[in-house]
């Protein structure tokens, strides 16, 4: 664990510059870290290699309905995400526990008209959850907060956060389950080292209050923070994106979400 804690001083940063690649129908090609492929191929496969001991993720955004499947280097199916029209499908890999290697992501058209954007991102950053203070500091500058974020030019992002079993944190959104997700694996169960969108949504031990969601880690180890863009990838000036603020749970205020007014000021006290 000491090897990984050396990264804890990093904060969530913008995903590497996006590369948009136009592909013809029925394409099969490598998918570089951070690259986005924009295509209307009915079925296409994209290969990539996990290169670091972090969570990584592949996602598909579309206004139609395309499904996503992930295979290992031997062709074995590892997971499928098949949500409906306009919902971003994703599958994440926990390379903190699963050996590094090659994968193939297959995108298949299900219904509707339109192209899709597929992107894979290797994890590169660590979020650190500060001790809650509830000091009334203005929202985005509040030192109590950590963030999960994604640039508007991207489909999806993932970062690591170290949590101990039973540790809790608040996320400031009524849209949890649409744009923010927590990933976790049972270290004793290799089948949990791959997580689909449905499996991320189904994490036990969550509750809601004041428009926020309280997450509880069920295992000790490196968890993933996923942020899904609220729109299809597009350039903005100035740069924009989607972000959710995280604040640690304070047992003295068990039903209070400190960042409930984010991006407004964090209220002081309970």
Image (tube, rainbow, N blue to C red):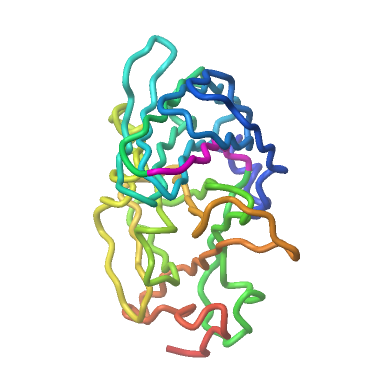
Residue 120 is a magenta residue: yes
Q: In the rendered picture of this protein, how many numbered marks are placed on residues?
A: 0
Q: Is residue 228 above or below residue 24?
A: below
Q: Is residue 134 above or below residue 108?
A: below
Front position in the image: 245 or 64: 64
Q: Residue shown at 42%/70% (left/top)?
A: 173
Residue 198 is a magenta residue: no
Front position in the image: 3 or 134: 134
Q: How far from the left and from the top, in percent, is residue 264?
A: 57, 84
Where is residue 122, by image quadrant?
A: top right
Q: Residue shown at 57%/87% (left/top)?
A: 136
Q: Residue shown at 52%/68% (left/top)?
A: 245
Q: How far from the left and from the top, in percent, is residue 108?
A: 37, 30
- Residue that lies at the very extreme toward the top in this rendered image: 74
Where is residue 260, by image quadrant?
A: bottom left
Q: Which residues are magenta?
A: 113-124
Q: Left of 20 or right of it: where is 183?
A: left
In this rendering, does residue 164 appear at all? yes
- Residue that lies at the very extreme toward the right in this rendered image: 238
Q: Is residue 155 above or below residue 42?
A: below
Q: How far from the left and from the top, in percent, is residue 183?
A: 39, 46
In this rendering, does residue 122 appear at all? no
Q: How far from the left and from the top, in percent, is residue 109?
A: 36, 33
Q: Left of 94 or right of it: where is 2?
A: right
């Amino acid at each position: 664990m000491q090897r990984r804690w050396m990264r804890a001083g990093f904060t969530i940063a913008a995903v590497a510059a996006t590369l948009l690649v136009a592909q013809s129908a029925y394409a099969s090609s490598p998918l570089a870290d951070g690259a986005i492929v924009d295509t209307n191929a009915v079925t296409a496969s994209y290969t990539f290699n996990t290169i670091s001991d972090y969570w990584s993720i592949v996602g598909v955004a579309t206004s139609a309905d395309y499904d996503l499947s992930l295979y290992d280097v031997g062709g074995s199916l590892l997971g499928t995400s098949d949500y409906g029209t306009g919902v971003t499908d994703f599958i994440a890999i926990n390379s903190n526990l699963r050996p590094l290697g090659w994968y193939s992501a297959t995108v298949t058209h299900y219904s509707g008209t339109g192209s899709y954007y597929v992107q894979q991102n290797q994890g590169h950053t660590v979020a650190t959850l500060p001790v809650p203070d509830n000091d009334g500091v203005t929202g985005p500058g509040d030192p109590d907060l950590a963030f999960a974020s994604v640039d508007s030019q991207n489909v999806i992002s993932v970062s690591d956060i170290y949590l101990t079993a039973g540790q809790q944190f608040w996320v400031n959104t009524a849209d949890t389950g649409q744009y923010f997700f927590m990933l976790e694996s049972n270290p004793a169960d290799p089948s949990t080292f791959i997580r689909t969108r449905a499996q991320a949504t189904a994490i036990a031990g969550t509750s809601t209050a004041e428009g926020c969601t309280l997450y509880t880690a069920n295992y000790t180890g490196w968890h993933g923070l996923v942020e899904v863009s609220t729109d299809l990838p597009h350039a903005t000036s100035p740069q924009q994106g989607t972000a959710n603020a995280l604040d640690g749970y304070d047992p003295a205020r068990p039903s209070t979400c400190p960042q409930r007014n984010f991006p407004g000021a964090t209220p002081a006290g309970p």
